[in-house]
Amino acid sequence: MIVIMSKSMREEELQGVISTIENHGLQAHIVRGAEKTIVGAVGDKSRLVKIPFQAMPGVEEVIPIITPYKLASRDFKPEDTIININGVTIGGNTIPVIAGPCAVESKEKLLEIACQVKEAGAQLLRGGAYKPRTSPYSFQGLEEEGLKHLALAREKTGLPIVTEAVDMNSLEKVAYYADVIQIGARNMQNFALLRAAAKSNKPVMLKRGLSATIEEWILAAEYIMSAGNPQVILCERGIRTFETYTRNTLDLSAVPIIKHLSHLPIIVDPSHGTGKWRWIQPMSQAGIAAGADGLMVEVHQNPSQALSDGGQSLTPEKFKIMMDKIKGVALAVGREIAL
Amino acid sequence: MIVIMSKSMREEELQGVISTIENHGLQAHIVRGAEKTIVGAVGDKSRLVKIPFQAMPGVEEVIPIITPYKLASRDFKPEDTIININGVTIGGNTIPVIAGPCAVESKEKLLEIACQVKEAGAQLLRGGAYKPRTSPYSFQGLEEEGLKHLALAREKTGLPIVTEAVDMNSLEKVAYYADVIQIGARNMQNFALLRAAAKSNKPVMLKRGLSATIEEWILAAEYIMSAGNPQVILCERGIRTFETYTRNTLDLSAVPIIKHLSHLPIIVDPSHGTGKWRWIQPMSQAGIAAGADGLMVEVHQNPSQALSDGGQSLTPEKFKIMMDKIKGVALAVGREIAL
Amino acid sequence: MIVIMSKSMREEELQGVISTIENHGLQAHIVRGAEKTIVGAVGDKSRLVKIPFQAMPGVEEVIPIITPYKLASRDFKPEDTIININGVTIGGNTIPVIAGPCAVESKEKLLEIACQVKEAGAQLLRGGAYKPRTSPYSFQGLEEEGLKHLALAREKTGLPIVTEAVDMNSLEKVAYYADVIQIGARNMQNFALLRAAAKSNKPVMLKRGLSATIEEWILAAEYIMSAGNPQVILCERGIRTFETYTRNTLDLSAVPIIKHLSHLPIIVDPSHGTGKWRWIQPMSQAGIAAGADGLMVEVHQNPSQALSDGGQSLTPEKFKIMMDKIKGVALAVGREIAL
Amino acid sequence: MIVIMSKSMREEELQGVISTIENHGLQAHIVRGAEKTIVGAVGDKSRLVKIPFQAMPGVEEVIPIITPYKLASRDFKPEDTIININGVTIGGNTIPVIAGPCAVESKEKLLEIACQVKEAGAQLLRGGAYKPRTSPYSFQGLEEEGLKHLALAREKTGLPIVTEAVDMNSLEKVAYYADVIQIGARNMQNFALLRAAAKSNKPVMLKRGLSATIEEWILAAEYIMSAGNPQVILCERGIRTFETYTRNTLDLSAVPIIKHLSHLPIIVDPSHGTGKWRWIQPMSQAGIAAGADGLMVEVHQNPSQALSDGGQSLTPEKFKIMMDKIKGVALAVGREIAL
C-alpha cells in the first residue's frame, strides 16, 4: 500500500499515518521526495486493506499495490484452468463454440436450431429460458418450460447446454437442468447470486458487467471461487462507451489481459458485444485471433421473427460460413476449433 | 416506431416490412425521401414492441418513439409524487437531508452519530448493515445486528432510517426494520430484488446504476411501480466515465431531466458521486440548486477510523457547515431545507 | 515517481531499475512488501520524467506522483487569479455572465440581442464568427464580417466580447477584435494554437476537451501560461459519456476540483454542456452553487430560426428569468452576480 | 429528417413545423401515432440540414436520417479505395505493416531500427519528428532534423515514410519530406489542418479522436476529401473509456463498420490502442482478423531507453515474431501480408 502525502501536509500528520500503520502491526517506509512524501505500508494484506488511509489528515492519495484477488490470479495458479463440460473442454488448446437462440421460443424451434448449430460445428447449445429485460413489459422467457426444452435438445443432439439464471428462483431450476450456469452482465455484482451459483458445483459463465473494469470482473469471479467453485468461465460481451453505432464496444484487449492476470478461460460474445448480426463474423475472427478460449454466438432460423434480439442473431447459413472462417484463424494462432 | 430502410433496399424488402406491420393489425405509413425510405408503424404499443424489425432484410435502423415506461412518466401522472416517511416528506417543497455513516460499525458509534446528524438538521438516518463489496474479502457489514442498532437509533432520535438491501435474504430483514429500503447501484437491474422490494410496501430508494442511462433507470423504477409500489425515490450517485480524479462523475443534469420525464422525487448522493469528502459540500449546494428533492450524505465522527468509505465522509462539524450553506441555496431556488 | 516491480521480477531487474535511477543522478528507495517490491525515485523532476521505466524489464507499473504542471497550480500561486477584461473581472467575488448567440448571423440581429442580454444583466457578449463544424457542409460562420459586427455591438453596448479562434488564420483576426479569445473543446490540445493565442496577450478562455481529464485540461492551460500569458479562464462544457439524453454530461465536480488544484478562474457553459435550452437554467444555478466564477450562455431572439445550435439557446425572456434566479443562488454561496 | 413532436404539442405547433418545411421548398409527411406525431421532412438535403427543428415549439426530438458525408461513403463509391505509396498499396488484398520508433531520436538509431523493421517485413517506416505532448515540458521531437533522418532512412532502406504533422508549421515540412502525412488523434477535428493536409496531395493518415464517434471520424475524412484529396487512410488507435488497465480501449468493431460505411482503407495501431507492448501482438492478430487493411506498430531497439512511449514499443525480436504470426492470420481471412 502506498500512501502519498499532500504537499502541504504537516509533520504530525505524517507521524499520524506512520503510527496508525505501526499500531496495526505493520511496517512503514518513508520516502521523502522533492515535492511529496510517500509512505510504503508493508505487511499482512488483510490488515492493510482495512485502514482508511484516504480519510486521514494530510493524505492525498492511496495506491493499493496488492492484487485484491487470489484464487483467480495466475500468480496463485500458473497453469491454465481447463473446464470439462460433459466432455467438451474450455480453456485448452481446442476452442468450442456455443450457439443457439437468444431466447427459447418453442420446443420445435429449439430442436430445429439445435440440430442446425450442431451440424455447423457448435459444441454447446445456448438459449435463454429466463430473460432479464430492461422493461417490465418485455417478453420474460418461457421459464421452466424453456429449461425442459433445452434438456430435450441436449438429449437429441448430445450438446451440453448453457443458460442464464437471473435470480435465486431461476438459479435453482437452471442448476438442475443446465450444464453451465450463465450469470448475465447486469448480475455480475449480484454477490448473493454469485455465491449461490457457486454452491451448485456446476461451471459458471460470468459475463462482464456493462461498466465493469477488468479488476472488478476478476473480483466477481473470486466471489464464486472463494465460495468453493473453481469452474468459472469469463465472457467478454462489450462495455458501455460513448459510441452509439454499436450496442456496446467489444473490448477484445480484455482477452490477452485476462489470460495474463488469471488462469481462468475467457470467451467472447460478439452478438451482445456489437448488437448487429453483420459484425458477428469479423469480431468472432478477431476474438479467436486475440486468444479467446471460446465464442458464444446467437443463431436463429428466422431472426426477423425472433422474440428477442433478432437483430444480433445469425441465420444457420451465416453461422456455418463463420465456423468455416474461424477454423483457419484458430489454426493460424496455434489453436483449433472443436468440431 | 420508425423503421429506416437502407439505401440499397429492394422493393420487396420494403413490402415485407409493410406486410409484417399490417399482419400485426397495425398501420404502416411510408415516407420516401431523397436518400432513404422510412416506414412509420402506428398502433397498439404492446404489439409494436414485439416485432423484431431490426432483423428484417433491408432494414437499417429502428427508432422507437414510444416511451417505454408508463407509471413512472409525468405524462401519466402530471403532479409530483410526494412520499411520506413517518412524517418526513420527499418530493414536496421542503427538502430533507439523509445522513449517517457508510456502515453501521457499533451501537455506540451509531447512536452518537445519529444524535449529531439530527442536531445538525438531518431528517433521516442512513447506515449500511449489509454492504455490497467488490471484493469477497472486504468487511460485509454487521447484518441484522446493524439493523437493530439502526432501530434503536430511530427510537432515540426519532429519525426514520434508510438502509440497503443487497439480496433477498437481507431484503426481508431490511423491510422489517427500515423505513426506506435502499437498492444500490449494482442492483439497479436486479429485477427480482426490485419486485420483492416492491412487495414490502415500504418506500424504495433506487440508486442509479454505474452505467445506466436515464431511461433504464426510470424503467427500473417502473419494475417496482408495476409490482404495485408507487413509492419510489430515485437517487443520482454518479456514473462511470473516463475521469479518474473523482470516483464517479456526478451527473446533476439528471436532476432536472428526471423532474421533467417523471413525477418521482430525485435526491443526490455527493458522497458516492465524488468519492471525496472535499467535494461533498459544493456538490450538495449544486444538487439543491439543480432542483434535487433531497440529499444523502455520509457522516462519520472519525472518518480516518471508518470501516468503509471513510474518505468520502464528512465529520459532524463539516456536515453542520454544509447544512447551513444549503439552507440559503434552497431558499434561493424557492425551496426550503427541512429541519 | 513510484516504480512498482512485478511479483515475478528477477533480482537483476530490480538492480537495473536502481542503477538507471542512480545513473541519472537521482536516489532510489526500495520498499520490499509481502507481495511486491516498489522503488521510490527521488530527485530532480525534469530528469525523472525522462526515464521510460515502463519499458524496463520487471517493471509492472509506474506511478508519477509529481504534479505535471507548475504555473497553473495552486501550490505555485496560492491566491486566486482575477482577470480584468476592460473592467469586468472574472475570478473574484463577483460573477459575470457571458451571453449571446451561438453564431453571429447578421449585424442587426447581433445588435438587437446584445442590447437584450445587456439589459438582462450580461457582462460580456459572446458570438461565434468562426464556427468549427463537424461537417464540412455546415454553416461555418461570417468570419471577419462577424468580428466587425461584434466590435460594433461592443461599441453600442459597452460589453467586452468573447469569440472563438478556430485556427491560426482566425486567431490573428480574433486577437485583433476580441477582448477574450475562446479556444474550443476540439482545439484544447491544438498546442500550436494555444501557444499562438498566448502570444496575443489577451485573456484566453480554454474550453475543456470532450474527453479531456482535468489534469490534461490544466496542462493545456500550462501551455498557454508557459508561453507567457497568465490570463487563462477555464470553461467546463460537458464531457462525453454513454448517456445519450443530453448532448454531453456537464461535469460540475470539475468546478471545485479546479479551484482546489489551480488558481485559475473557471466558468460553466450549460448550453453546450447539456445541448437543450430546457436544462440551462437549472444547470446555471447548479454551476454557481458549485462555485463557478462565471457562466456562458447562448441566447437567441428566435432560437427556432438560428443558423446553429438553436436548440440549446434561451430566448431573451427566459434568459432574464435565469439571471434573476442565479442572483439569489450566488448570494447564498457568498458571491454576487455582476450587473 | 424525422421530427418527433412532443406528446403535449399543440396543433398550431405541428402546423408551424409543417409550414417551415414547406416554406423551404420541401415536403412534409405527417404520421399520427397513438402516442406521438412524427413529421417526415423530405427533399433537398442541403436545405434540410439548415432548419433548426430542435428549437421549434412542440418538437421533442429530431432524427437526421440522411448520411452527413458523401465522398467518403460507400454508397457514393462502392469499390474499395486503394492507395499507392511509392509502390506500397493500402486497401487492397495485401496488408502492409508500418513500423518504427515512436519518436526519431538520432540518425544512427533511426537507420538501425529502419533496417531491422524492413528485415522483419515492414513495408513503411514510421517515426515522429514533431511530437504533440500533453505537457509543455515533455520532449517535443527533433523537428526538421528528424524529418531529414527519416528521408535518409528511406533512401537507405527504400521504405516510404509516415510521420505526423502537428500544426501548420510542421505540416509544410512534413508534406515536403514524408510519403504519408499523419494527423494525430488530438488533431482529428483541427479542420484547418485537415484542409491544409489535403492541399499537399500526399496521402493522409487520419487517426481517430480519443472520443470521436465513427460518424465524426468519417466526417473528418470528408473534410480532407472535400478539399480535393481522395487519399485518406483511417487509423483506429483506441478510444477513451472507464477502463484504466489499458491506456485506451482499442475498438476493433470500428474496422468492419468503416469497411461497411466507407470505401476508405482502415488500419489499426495497437501500440497506442493498448499502451503496453505486451498486448501488441494479440491485438495485431485480432486487427487483421477483423479485416484491417494494415497495422502501425511502434518498434524500438531498446524500449527502456526510448525518449517517448517506450512502454508500448516492441523490440525488433518481438516484432519479428509478431510478423510471423500475422501472416497466418491474414491467410486465414483471405488476405496476405506484404513483405
Image: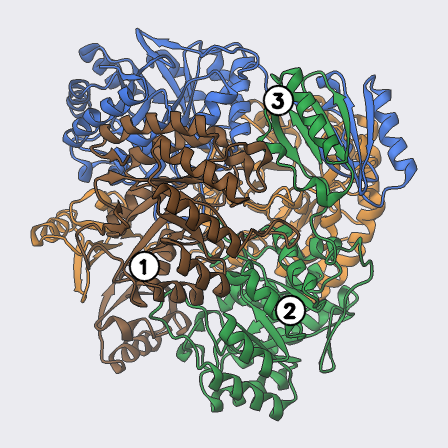
Chain colours: A brown, B green, C orange, D blue
Chain letter for the residue marked with disc 2 in the picture: B
Name the residue carrying label 2. Answer: B198
The numbered disc on residue D294 is: none
Q: Residue at x 59, y 69 (%)?
A: B196
Position of the N terminus of chain B by quadrant: top right
Name the residue carrying label 1. Answer: A35
Q: Bin the neighbour count of mark 3 within 10 Å (Cα to Cα): few under 14, some 14-19, many 20 and up.
A: some
**In the depicted view, which residue is nearer to us: D93 or A282?**
A282
- Residue A269: x, y in percent? 41, 41
Name the residue carrying label 3. Answer: B6
Amino acid type at image mark 1: Glu
To the question of a shared chain for discs 2 and 1, the answer is no
Amino acid type at image mark 3: Ser
- Please state if B172 lies on the left or on the right of B92 as rendered: left
Q: Nearer the viewer, mark 2 or mark 1?
A: 2
Q: CA distance from mark 2 to mark 1?
A: 54 Å
